[in-house]
Image (cartoon, rainbow, N blue to C red):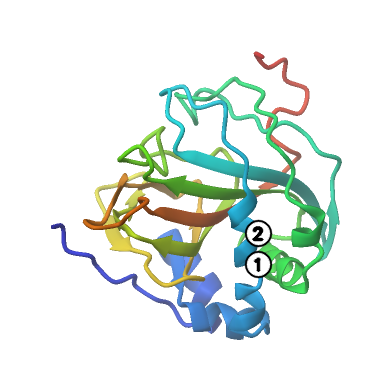
Amino acid sequence: MTAAFSPPFTPPDRLAATLRQDGYAVLSPQGVADWVSAPLAQLEALHADWDHLPLDEYLKDGGRYRKRRHACFIDEGGKLAQSPHRAHWQPIEYNALHGGMRRLFEPVEPATVAQPAWTQLLTALGAVCSSVRGAHTWSVEAHQFRIDTADGIGRPTPEGAHRDGVDFVAVILIAREGIKGGETRVFDAHGPRGQRFTMEEPWTLLLLDDAAVIHESTPIQPLAGAASGGHRDTLVLTWRAGGFQGDGVQAEE
């Protein structure tokens, strides 16, 4: 079995500085709770919403291991407003597997967005993005993912090591049950440096400068004896200045 390496946790008050220096930073669950001024129990109240995600019908590898929902927001000076529902789109140069496709996923449920922890989390992260890159009107995308092992293996990043074509990416572990694997790997986009670790505790948060680093998560498999396989739940958030990807682009169906 591959050894699991612990994340290199950053104190919350060093989040922006570490992001500038290393291109990424990781907060512990308690660090996240302290930073957004929300008890862990309040954050954990979001977890049940991952039990109702519909199947991702767009996987080009033919897999049925991914479920997801999607929503978009505008963050203007810390004021967060949900945008009309829209398709998710990425260019081929950032996603060789699914780039160029209009992928219209089911929206994040209104009850999820209405929870105070949701707004607290997104606005706190948006403030860090502005402190690192300067004040912008941020186009924010939110993706709820469940990767399962019902068919034996699940791929959190079927496109492999990649950048997302945005300014910042946050990957938050919501749950990890009955699986092995799922190691996070972060590589310097312009040099040989790299880091590997496993996010095991719910509400561990990884924040990435998308121009500075490339990232991926390795496949997951069920633990021996797991009766119905297992799953890995994450919330992936992205911030982009200058509009959403795909604005004004004629995308393929």
Q: Is there any visible trace of residue 237 in the rendered image?
A: no
**Residue contact at pointers 2 and 1, CB within 8 angstroms:** yes
Q: Number of labelled discs?
A: 2
Classify the position of the N terminus by image quarter. bottom left
**Gap between marks 2 and 1 measured at Cα:** 6 Å
Q: Mark 2 is on which residue type? A: Asp
Residues packed near mark 2 inside 10 Å, few (<14), some (14 to 19) or many (20 plus)? few
Place residue 26 in its image quadrant: bottom left
Whether residue 158 is visible to the viewer of this picture, yes or no, is: yes
From the top left corner, tell me how far across and down residue 178 is, in percent.
34, 60
* Structural crowding at the residue carrying mark 1, measured as other residues with C-alpha within 10 Å and reported as few (<14), some (14–19) or many (≥20): some
Q: Nearer the viewer, residue 147 or 101?
A: 147
| Residue 154 in the image, given as x and y percentages of width and height | 37, 41
Q: In the structure shown, which secondary structural element does the residue marked by tag 2 occupy?
A: helix
Horizontal arrangement in the rendering, residue 25 relative to residue 140 (left or right)? left
Q: Amino acid at mark 1?
A: Leu
Q: In the shown orientation, is residue 72 left or right of residue 36?
A: right
Residue 46 disc label: 1
Labelled disc at residue 49:
2
Residue 156 percent location from the top left of the image: 42, 44
Q: Secondary structure at mark 1?
A: loop
Residue at 74% across, 43% down: 107
Q: Quarter of the image holding residue 76?
A: bottom right
Residue at image coords 28%, 59%: 195
- Of residues 198 and 212, the one drawn nearer to the viewer in this rendering: 198
Q: Nearer the viewer, residue 42 or 161?
A: 42
Determine whether, in the image, residue 17 is placed left or right of residue 159: right
